[in-house]
Image (tube, rainbow, N blue to C red):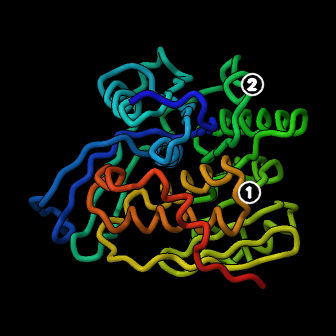
């Protein structure tokens, strides 16, 4: 799949894994073996999943991550390239194995459980050409993995924005990581999951308030199937999430982030960007499998949802 060089460039910085996904009727108990009803293997990780979504929506996606050498790294790289993602490996000669995630998806609920090394094994620094890799991007998304790389990419994006008016920096706040304290003041948009918390803060509403107090210009909080909340420049509102049967939640947050990044790159305002992201994430959870949902994702989906139900307060 070749990327459209005229499409807006989105740069995604962070984790890429190999996801081995088993769909099970029930999770195994201690010392028990179960037979899966379906098995899939695909590239995973927050930044990688967002990049795949962005590319599927017609954007030009560049993923900056750490893979290294070895069979697993080769599988991850090949699958991402097949999905239209340009992969920049900042650890090309590393013998440290690329991370593998063991994923179980419950047939009854669609909920997933994940065990992974994440980025724990890789210690990487930013490449010398990082500024060049970020230059010209319409949007940059950082997921907080590979902390030194994440911080450097955020600084590079902020410098590009301040000097030339682009790009917008998005922070995927799925889980608190120490580097978040450095990333948040630089971010234009912080997208939080419902269970993300600032240290010492209880509740997603209090976390959103804390982010606004820190000076984050735009805060978006997703709540699964409940309405998405947003705050921006003294305004706030909600966006309804389409109701669909929940069959597979793996990567739903990544789909939301990738679609939001694509909407930002197209210049959509926050309520419409949140609506586009909610529609894409809902489409994802309604289809079984880590990639099957992309085949049914219309290229015009982000345009069709600009009239999604929104509320402002």
Residue 295 picture location, percent across and down: 32, 50
Disc 1: CA contacts within 10 A as few (<14), some (14-19) or many (>=20): many
What residue do we see at 63% from left, 35% from top?
9
The answer to which of 70 and 12 lies nearer the viewer is 12
Compare marks 2 and 1 and give the one earlier in the sequence. 2
On the image, which quarter does residue 231 sit in?
Answer: bottom right
Find residue 296 and report its horizontal and vertical position in percent: 33, 56
Q: Residue at x 49, y 30 (%)?
A: 3
Residue visible at 54% across and 32% down in the picture? 65
* Quadrant (top left/top right/bottom left/bottom right) for the C terminus: bottom right
Can you identify the residue that label 2 sits on? 131
The quarter of the image holding the N terminus is: top left
Of helix, strand and loop, which one carries label 2?
A: helix
Taking the image as drawn, is residue 198 in sight?
no
Based on the displayed image, in which of its 4 quarters is residue 67 positioned? Answer: top left
* Residue picked out by circle 1: 189
Residue 166: image tag: none
Position of 277 with respect to 138 (left or right) is left
> Can you give x and y, in whole percent of width and height, for residue 200 in the image?
72, 71
Picture quadrant where residue 11 is located = top right
Q: Residue at x 53, y 44 (%)?
A: 47
Asked if residue 284 lies left or right of residue 277, the reply is left
Rendered location of residue 58, percent (x, y): 51, 42
Q: Quick check: 226 above or below 192? A: below
Q: CA distance from mark 2 to mark 1?
A: 20 Å
């Amino acid at each position: 799949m070749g990327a459209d060089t005229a499409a807006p460039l989105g740069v995604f910085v962070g984790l890429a894994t190999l996801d081995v996904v088993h769909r099970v009727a029930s999770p195994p108990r201690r010392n028990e073996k179960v037979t899966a009803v379906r098995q899939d293997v695909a590239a995973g990780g927050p930044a990688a999943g967002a990049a795949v979504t962005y590319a599927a929506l017609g954007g030009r996606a560049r993923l900056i991550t750490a893979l290294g050498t070895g069979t697993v790294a080769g599988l991850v790289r090949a699958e991402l390239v097949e999905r239209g993602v340009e992969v920049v490996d900042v650890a090309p000669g590393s013998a440290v194995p690329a991370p593998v995630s063991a994923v179980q998806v419950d047939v009854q609920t669609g909920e997933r459980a994940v065990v992974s090394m994440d980025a724990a094994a890789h210690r990487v620094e930013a490449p010398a050409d990082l500024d060049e890799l970020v230059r010209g991007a319409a949007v940059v998304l950082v997921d907080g993995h590979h902390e030194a790389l994440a911080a450097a990419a955020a600084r590079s994006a902020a410098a590009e924005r301040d000097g030339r008016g682009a790009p917008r920096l998005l922070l995927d706040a799925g889980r608190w990581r120490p580097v978040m304290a450095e990333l948040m003041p630089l971010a234009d948009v912080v997208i939080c999951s419902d269970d993300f918390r600032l240290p010492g803060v209880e509740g997603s509403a209090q976390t959103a308030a804390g982010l606004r107090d820190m000076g984050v210009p735009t805060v978006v909080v997703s709540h699964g199937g409940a309405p998405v909340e947003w705050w921006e420049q003294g305004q706030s509102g909600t966006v309804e999430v389409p109701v669909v049967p929940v069959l597979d939640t793996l990567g739903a947050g990544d789909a939301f982030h990738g679609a939001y990044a694509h909407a930002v790159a197209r210049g959509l305002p926050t309520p419409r960007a949140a609506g586009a992201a909610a529609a894409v994430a809902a489409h994802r959870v309604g289809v079984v499998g880590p990639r099957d949902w992309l085949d049914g994702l219309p290229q015009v989906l982000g345009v069709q949802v600009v009239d999604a139900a929104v509320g402002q307060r």
